[in-house]
Amino acid sequence: MAYPPYQQPAKRESPQETLIKIIVFIALVLVLLVVLTKFKFIHTRDIPGWKGFYCGVVEQQQSRIMMLHGDDGLGDAEKLANQLSRFRVSAPPEQLHVSRLSSGVLKNYELVIVEHMKRITFTQAEALKSYMDGGGSIIWIGDAGSDYYLSEEDLSAALIKNESNPGYYERLLNQSRKTTGFGEIGEYYLGVTYLRTENDTSGVVLKVVDRSNPLVQAVIQELDLNSMPFAVVNENKVGAATVTKSAILDYGGHEYPAVIDSKYVGRIVYVSFPPEEITESIQPTGLLTNMVDFLVSC
């Protein structure tokens, strides 16, 4: 008579081993949530209780915001910074003139707002592209960065590079002649091409076209902006990124893009008009508050 082979009873998992597996699982989930939040795939408000943990334990501070400005162009950077300071009392935006911009100065900020900065050098543009490539989020307003020029520093540096890289100086000059509007920043980051600025306007109406977008959820469906100056832009595709138009400007029988956002590494929002000019009397809960809440974690 054949007997079945002896099978050793399966070893039961101890309570300690089960607890260790649970702890490891929870740790992996937390790490995943931190990464998804850091790179703007989810927002801290998307999961109940997550904002308190992420901001209190991971970041341990409110998100830092940089207000980058120049000397010309649409918008009032000082007014915008003052408005932001009212609802971010403990972490008001810091201001920086574009002349002091360098490639590393922006890396410690979760959000950079660019306004009243029409003129931009190629070196300054590279610093902003480097910030966005590294995961930084941007609010780009109006005609900022639509007038490229070569500074004396750019030209001096190009002459030095030309000694070891013959033709570099001429190539830079050719690039400066060909670059119009937002240049590569508009083509590869913002999702718009700059055409012109409308200053003498009357009867401009902001219309929401995508109510599900968090950027405009608190904005009135049709908002009379009176004589609001704005930049006229064309939409374009940014690589494989999805570009979303959530609001338009109705002016003179034509419709122009007003609020456009896309997911690059971080989040990028383009607004064709100065949002700080939507006063409390016009819009009690403003577009500006929506944008900042959408783009910063804490």
Image (spheres, helix red, strand yellow):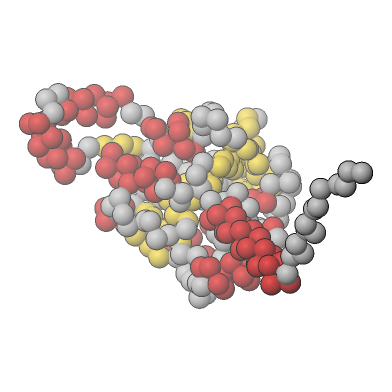
| Residue at 57% over, 73% down | 56
Residue plotted at (40% across, 65% down):
94
In-image side of 109 versus 8 (left or right)? left
Closer-to-camera residue (283/120): 120
Q: Position of residue 139 (x, y in %)?
A: 50, 50
* Residue at screen point 53% across, 68% down: 58
Left or right: residue 155 compared with residue 94: left
Direction right: furthest residue:
1
Answer above or below: position of 79 versus 210.
Answer: below
Residue 26 appears in the picture as rendered: no
The percent position of residue 45, horizontal first and vertical second, equals 67, 61
Choose between 225 and 15: the one closer to the eye. 15
- Which residue lies most toward the left here? 163
Q: Residue at x 86, y 47 (%)?
A: 4
Residue 256 appears in which quarter of the rendering?
Answer: top right
Residue 78: where, in percent of width, then height? 42, 62
